[in-house]
Image (cartoon, helix red, strand yellow):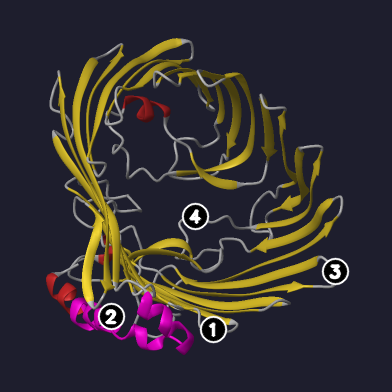
Amino acid sequence: MKPASFLYMMRSRVIPFLMAITVIPRLLHGQDVEAVIKAPPLTANGGIAFSQIVQAADRGKAQSPYSYYLTGNLNFNFFGAANVPLSFAFSNQQFSGRASLPFNRFSIAPSCKWIKAYAGYASLQFSPYTLAGHEIFGGGAELSPPGRFKFTAIYGRLKKAIYGQEGEPAYRRMGGGFKAEYADEHFDAGVNIFKAKDISDPSVFLNPDSITVLPQDNLSGSVYLNVRLAGKVRYGAEYGVSAMNRDMRGSKGNALFDNSGDVSVYHAMRHNITCTLSAGAVGASYERVAPNYATLGAYYMLSDFENITANFSTVIKDVNIAVDGGYQHDNLKNQKSAATSRMIFSGSVSTAIGQKWNLGANVSNVQSYMHIRDIYRQLSQTNEFQNLDTLEYTQVNLTSSANVAYLLQNTEQQRQSISAGFMYQRAAEQQEYTAYRGNNIYNGSLVYQFSHIPAKWSVSAFVNYNHNLTPDMYTGTASYSLSAQKSFTEKLQGAFAATYSNMSGNGENMANVLNVRITGGYALLKKHNFSLSAAAVRTGSKTQKNVQYSINLAYGYSFGMTVARKDKKVAVSGSF
């Protein structure tokens, strides 16, 4: 944001908003006046954390020799009626230009009775067909006055402009929306509209025709209804529509939607009905999303499908069972050379046998997007802040997992447990921007934990194997981990962890990773927490070997305070 724009925002939005906070108590009803008078004028609590990381390598220069991360949160409560929560995060690190969620951020969400405001970074969910959790840097409000209605509005920046050497080129994207809802004991309904548009700045892109990313304009909306019918039957429906202009370089105006360009209109709908019986809950659902349906209010979205499903869930002698099955097909407009149709299903079962056994399993072939963590990145990172800007999602067509846990011992002196888990995932073959296209991923793990309660120490051992079968090859990663924790006093704790991993491909050794970490923590006056950790990561392959070292010094502080009135005097109390 340019300094002039920032000052303008402060004058036109933030300052009036802060002034409004001082008059919010006037909105209180008469019956609340006595409670407000008796409440403390101000209570506050919060905390701050500061972490410094120094890194070095025995060969070459470390990627980030010095980095720091500052985070904090603060909440003010005025007269027990108005809340002003505040949070922020800041770092000197320059994350990847493809990062969808910035680390450096600031947010505030004050509320008073039925009024809540948003400023800074906020993420709202209007509908899966319009604004679906995309983060917005700006401002908004949520009004829930006494009665049946609720109103929500937000506006701000969805994406920063990126050009030059900063990463993939992108236009600055602005957007906002409005949602109105009504609810009573018989039904609830709502309508929402979301608008987002790329700002084509000639000073940024001197030659727009050379940019592979085209400016877009989007206007979407949806309406939903949920009705409670006779007995225990409920019916719900939603209809969504999205108008998308994927190339608005020829825009000539600032209309609500620019239809001069590559314009398409998409439709989506869903219906569901459920009935609760003594034997369990049974229901059915239908969803249809048009081919290429898209909204700029969502990061990822599935389209071109029609689902018809039925579901049933029940509890039989402490066994929880849920089953969902149906039919799915694509190529709704016969635009593809080949259509696919399949039976879709998902099911889960879980139970606790006595006080020692816990069992669970689930399977699903319903398409979904999920974040699959890269095993090598996970094993070779030297601190928890690495790979923060990694937000690469993979479309998965099949997921199945099973887990079992057994409590070996549970006494006042000792506690022992063992658990095992297995997971299988099959990634979709047709997708972009992912390293897992068409992969079959298998993962198995075994964990043992032991705790000596009087001595305040515990150890755990972990074995994991990950097998990734690609169309061209396979890779396998075996990991062995040992960790121990010890509380020397109520204020002083220590921990040790070591992990060794071996990665192979097509039967040949590819890399070995040894990760060793020692951590110590000290609490001062219950409010100040210091921690110091040292880590060494040794990576070796056929071509090169390297050792990375890191030291992390962190400090955390939390506090709480109350400003009260007593005998016509002001008294301040708290823990600092």
Label disc, if present, on residue 300 of the rendered structure: 4
- Pick the residue in front: 321 or 288: 321
In the rendered structure, are the residues bearing label 2 and label 1 in contact, judged by CB atoms less than 8 Å apart?
no
* Label 1 sits on residue: 146
Which amino acid does the dot numbered 3 rest on? Gly
In the rendered structure, are the residues bearing label 3 and label 2 in contact, judged by CB atoms less than 8 Å apart?
no
Secondary structure beneath label 3: loop
Front position among marks 4 and 2: 2
Mark 3 to mark 2: distance in Å? 47 Å
- Above or below: residue 12 compared with residue 139: below
Label 3, residues with CA under 10 Å away: few <14, some 14-19, many ≥20? few
Looking at the image, tell me whether mark 2 or mark 1 is earlier in sequence order: 2
Indicate the quadrant where residue 120 lies.
bottom left
Looking at the image, tell me whether mark 1 or mark 4 is earlier in sequence order: 1
Label 4, residues with CA under 10 Å away: few <14, some 14-19, many ≥20? some
Which amino acid does the dot numbered 1 rest on? Pro
Mark 1 to mark 4: distance in Å? 36 Å
Q: Is residue 373 left or right of residue 2?
A: right
Residue 259 inside the magenta-drawn segment: no
Range drawn in magenta: 9-38
In the rendered structure, are the residues bearing label 1 and label 3 in contact, judged by CB atoms less than 8 Å apart?
no
Q: Is residue 74 visible?
A: no
Q: Is residue 477 left or right of residue 166?
A: right
Label disc, if present, on residue 516 of the rendered structure: none
x and y, in percent, of residue 467 in the image: 53, 22
Which amino acid does the dot numbered 2 rest on? Phe
- Pick the residue in front: 206 or 82: 82
Label 2, residues with CA under 10 Å away: few <14, some 14-19, many ≥20? some
Q: Quadrant of the N terminus?
A: bottom left
Secondary structure beneath label 4: loop
